[in-house]
Image: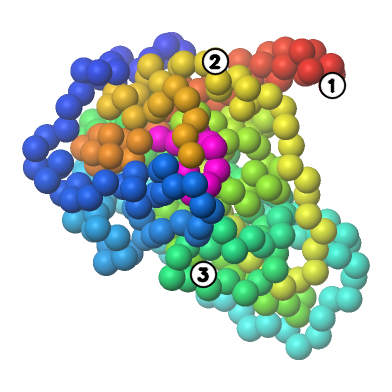
């Protein structure tokens, strides 16, 4: 398969959802996500939260049913939903400095399936409405996709390679986040894991950006300078005293302003060419009402992150070098 668009994918503007799928999209997700709202607020529960917490429960269940038709998908996602037991918090504290503890956490995580890690101070805006997190720190773990498998999305009943890689990375995120949380608990501090794909209290992309793991892309996903958009996230919150990692800027945001690859690759045309105001912040945003019906019928998607130039291993180093020269930071 060449690096051009997967020939199994419909071209932009040629796909329309089935009426029965649209019937399950009972309210606009864009409004619930806060598009056009000028005041900051916490995000509302949406897709992949428990079905009774949002108005698209039936649509979410259909998405899961369709994905199970892909060969190997159930086995791939089984690890993501197999939660290890959390140990009790040790009575004795590790009294190392916050900097030393942060380095120890990073070393442990990177030796337990994590590909990259960042640390950010907790912000109430990282917590979904209706939930509570009292820990002052967020640790975000990045799990890189296998690009050759990812590029085969979307999956179907004859080819489950793409969706299986998604499941595999979520499974790694589950194992790694629980391992990190248990290590922190063994050091005498509280810690809770937040793996995907099922959402819970913790928003992940925003703290990942604050922790220096990447920038937000036009496709609404994190762009990592190491892995492009081909990365999944998991989180751990804790009261262990830590030092944060700093946000980074390597030019992805400016690049997205001119690049149209994901916009043209999206079959339902869900990716808009300009930023929008979402809960008081001007940012890239993907049209929920166009994206989700395709996601449901295609048994997951991921086209935008697979086609993103930053995700392509042969392209990413050239982009980083070019943008570094342009900014004078090389």
- The image shows residue 195 at horizontal and vertical percentages of 51, 58
Residue extent of the magenta highlight: 278-286
Q: Residue under circle 1?
A: 329
* Left or right of residue 166, residue 251 in this image: right
SS of the residue at dot 1?
loop
Vertical relation: 190 (above or below) 47: below
Numbered circle sitting on residue 258: 2
Quadrant in the picture for the C terminus: top right
- The image shows residue 299 at horizontal and vertical percentages of 26, 39
Q: Residue at x 12, y 46 (%)?
A: 23
Q: Residue furthest bottom?
A: 91
Q: Residue at x 72, y 12 (%)?
A: 322
Nearer the viewer's eye, disc 1 or disc 3?
1
Q: Residue at x 63, y 26 (%)?
A: 252
Give the camera-side residue of 309 and 109: 309
Mark before the other along the chain sequence, 1 or 3: 3
Q: Residue under circle 3?
A: 84
Mark before the other along the chain sequence, 1 or 2: 2
Quadrant in the picture for the N terminus: top left
Can residue 34 be seen? yes
Give the camera-side residue of 49 and 101: 49
Q: Residue furthest front?
A: 38
* Left or right of residue 70, residue 204 in this image: right
Numbered circle sitting on residue 1: none
Can residue 113 be seen? no
Q: Is residue 330 magenta?
A: no
């Amino acid at each position: 398969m060449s690096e051009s668009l997967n020939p199994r994918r419909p071209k932009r503007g040629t796909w329309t959802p089935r009426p029965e799928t649209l019937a399950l999209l009972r309210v606009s997700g864009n409004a619930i996500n806060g598009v056009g709202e000028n005041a900051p607020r916490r995000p509302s529960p949406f897709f992949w939260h428990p079905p009774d917490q949002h108005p698209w429960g039936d649509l979410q269940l259909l998405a899961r049913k369709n994905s199970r038709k892909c060969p190997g998908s159930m086995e791939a996602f089984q690890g993501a939903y197999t939660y290890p037991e959390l140990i009790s918090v040790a009575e004795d504290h590790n009294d190392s400095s916050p900097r030393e503890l942060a380095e120890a956490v990073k070393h442990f995580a990177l030796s337990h399936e994590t590909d990259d890690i960042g640390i950010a101070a907790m912000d109430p805006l990282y917590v979904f409405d209706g939930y509570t997190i009292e820990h002052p720190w967020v640790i975000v773990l990045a799990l890189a996709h296998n690009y050759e498998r990812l590029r085969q999305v979307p999956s179907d009943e004859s080819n489950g390679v793409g969706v299986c890689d998604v499941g595999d990375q979520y499974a790694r995120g589950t194992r790694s986040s629980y391992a990190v949380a248990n290590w922190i608990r063994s050091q005498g501090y509280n810690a809770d894991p937040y793996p995907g794909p099922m959402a819970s209290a913790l928003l992940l992309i925003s703290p990942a950006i604050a922790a220096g793991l990447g920038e937000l892309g036009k496709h609404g996903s994190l762009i990592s300078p190491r892995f492009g958009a081909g990365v999944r996230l998991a989180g751990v919150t804790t009261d262990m005293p830590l030092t944060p990692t700093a946000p980074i800027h390597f030019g992805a945001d400016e690049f997205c302003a001119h690049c149209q690859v994901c916009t043209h690759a999206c079959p339902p045309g869900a990716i808009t060419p300009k930023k929008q105001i979402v809960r008081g912040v001007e940012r890239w945003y993907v049209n929920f009402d166009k994206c989700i019906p395709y996601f449901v019928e295609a048994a997951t998607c991921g086209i935008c992150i697979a086609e993103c130039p930053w995700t392509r291993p042969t392209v990413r180093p050239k982009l980083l070098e070019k943008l570094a020269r342009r900014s004078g930071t090389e």
